[in-house]
Amino acid sequence: MAEVVRDKRMSVSQRALFSAITEFEKYPEFLNEVTGAKIIKRPSPDKVHVQFEIEVVKKFVYTLEFQLKGSEEVKWKLVDSDFFKKNEGRWVLKEKGNNETEVHYELDVAVVFMVPSWIAKKLTEVNLPKMFESFEVRAKELAK
């Protein structure tokens, strides 16, 4: 469906942004489409399996395995889903000082049914900026 690569500078510390990204069970509090999130397995200190429930026209459930590399990178891949055929990506965070973080984001997803190109475009061009903004706002709340 979509491969996305975005770079953005956020006005928040790397530590606060990393916390916002890795507090998976809090996603329903600040990401509108996420209706549920729970950690279901922690195979090692740097790996975690999280089951998400999202509402996009109807409810879908999927599980991602996250790999944490220090506080600089969060990488994920699909474990199980009734919606996605593929869902993998990563956040790479670089502290730029003065509460600034350079963010590199990659996402590669495919769903089990055909998605019209206009929907894929909406997801990447409209929802992605909103998602970035939601994580930045959440990180600023955590930094207080």
Image: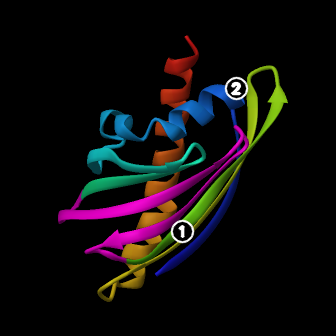
- The image quarter containing residue 117 is bottom left
70 is higher (above) or lower (below) than 81: above
Callout 2, which amino acid? Answer: Ser
- The image quarter containing residue 93 is top right
- The image quarter containing residue 58 is bottom left
Magenta stretch: includes residue 120: no
Location of mark 1 (residue): 88
Quadrant of the snapshot with the C terminus: top right
Magenta stretch: includes residue 83: yes
**Region of the chain picked out in magenta, as a range:** 55-84
Percent across and percent down for residue 89 are 58, 64
In this view, the residue in front, 87 or 46, is: 46
Percent across and percent down for residue 112 are 32, 84
Specify the farthest residue to the front: 43
Q: Main secondary structure of the magenta part?
A: strand
Location of mark 2 (residue): 13
Percent across and percent down for residue 135 are 51, 37
Residue at 51 percent of width and 77 percent of height:
2
Instruction: Please indicate whether residue 42 sits to the left or right of residue 139 in the image.
Output: left
Q: Secondary structure at mark 1?
A: strand
Q: CA distance from mark 2 to mark 1?
A: 25 Å
Instruction: Please indicate whether residue 133 sits to the left or right of residue 84 in the image.
Output: right
Callout 1, which amino acid? Answer: Glu
1 is higher (above) or lower (below) than 122: below
